Image (spheres, grey):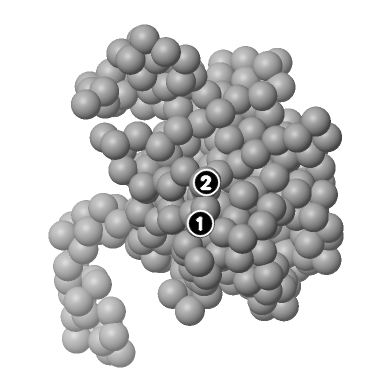
Amino acid sequence: MLINKRIIVGAIAVYLILPVIVPVVSTENEIKYIPSLIYDADSMEYWAVLVGIGDYPGVTSDLPYSINEIMSFKDTLLDGGNWNESNIHVLTDNDATKANIFNELEWLNSNADKNDISIFYYAGHGVQSSNNEYLAVYDELISDEELDEELDNFESRITVILDACHSGGFIEEVGKRGRVILTACRKDEETYQVFELRSGIFGYFINISLEKLTKTAETTFLFTWFFSVYYSKQLSQYYEGDYTIHPRMYDGCLGMTRIIDHHQYVQTFLYKMFPSIIENSNVNNINNRTWKM
């Protein structure tokens, strides 16, 4: 197991040196900020399409943890307080065809208006040609150009999370105003699923960061970048190979893109700290519950 106390120390370090990390990442072209629209937070709804493919047909190698990765992410969203399960659609294995994915993106677009937050999360194979990058879905390929064209009709702010090899190349086509793009690695890199994590490296730290530390896409990326680079370098040293990844981000939105409202352990803490307020929150007559001192 390669995760140890240094990961925790790293989290504390990120908090302390966050102002330093941002410009360092920016100079390496891992992150790019572009101003966009201002959204009305009071009227926001949250919608997601999550795609995980582990069982590929034919000669394509299977991926054991794609489904576990997206289901863990779904649990984190539902624990975050601002998500309804009916607003999250999941496609796995033979259901994750090109036609079905585009149908789900159309569902996403038809439900999410300009004040909403949408997420498209893909965990599976990614491939590259001389001109394009592709998501290798169950039956076909989805090119970066096709995904960009599908997202062109979206009014909502959409976060695209791609945990796949060569996924950084999607930023060149898909990175536009109103979109936040998070990718597992650079255009010229491959990425990996790991037995100890039961997930892709990038997806694992996306989920851990959002579950424990962060609430927005932007801050989640910063922690994920730090943890993913550190862990993958440790993996490379341990197995004497090159497994290092460098996640990338494009931010075409003004301000932070909130994904969850709260962390579950914070709510548990509040219930323990303020039981009388919470348990009696429906009491109409406060005069029967309070006494002036």
Residue 38 against residue 226 in the figure, above or below: below
x%, y% of residue 40?
Answer: 69, 64
Residue at x 47% of width, y 15% of height: 242
Left or right of 153 in this view: 5 = left
- Specify the quadrant of the image occupied by residue 79: bottom left
Seen as rendered, the residue at the extreme bottom is 284
Between 289 and 75, the residue placed more toward the observer is: 75
Q: Position of residue 158 (x, y in %)?
A: 68, 57
Percent x, y for residue 182? 61, 41
Where 234 falls versus 64 (above or below)? above
Q: Which mark is residue 219?
A: none
Q: Which mark is residue 60?
A: 2
> 118 or 259, which lies in front?
118
Whether tag 1 and tag 2 are in contact, CB under 8 A, the answer is yes
Q: Is residue 145 visible?
A: yes
Q: Residue at x 30, y 89 (%)?
A: 284
Q: How crowded is mark 1: few (under 14 residues within 10 Å), some or many (20 or more)?
A: few
Residue pictured at 19% horizontal, 86% vertical: 288
Q: Which amino acid does label 2 sit on?
A: Thr
Could you say whether the residue bearing mark 2 is in a helix, strand or loop? loop
The residue to which callout 1 is attached is 57
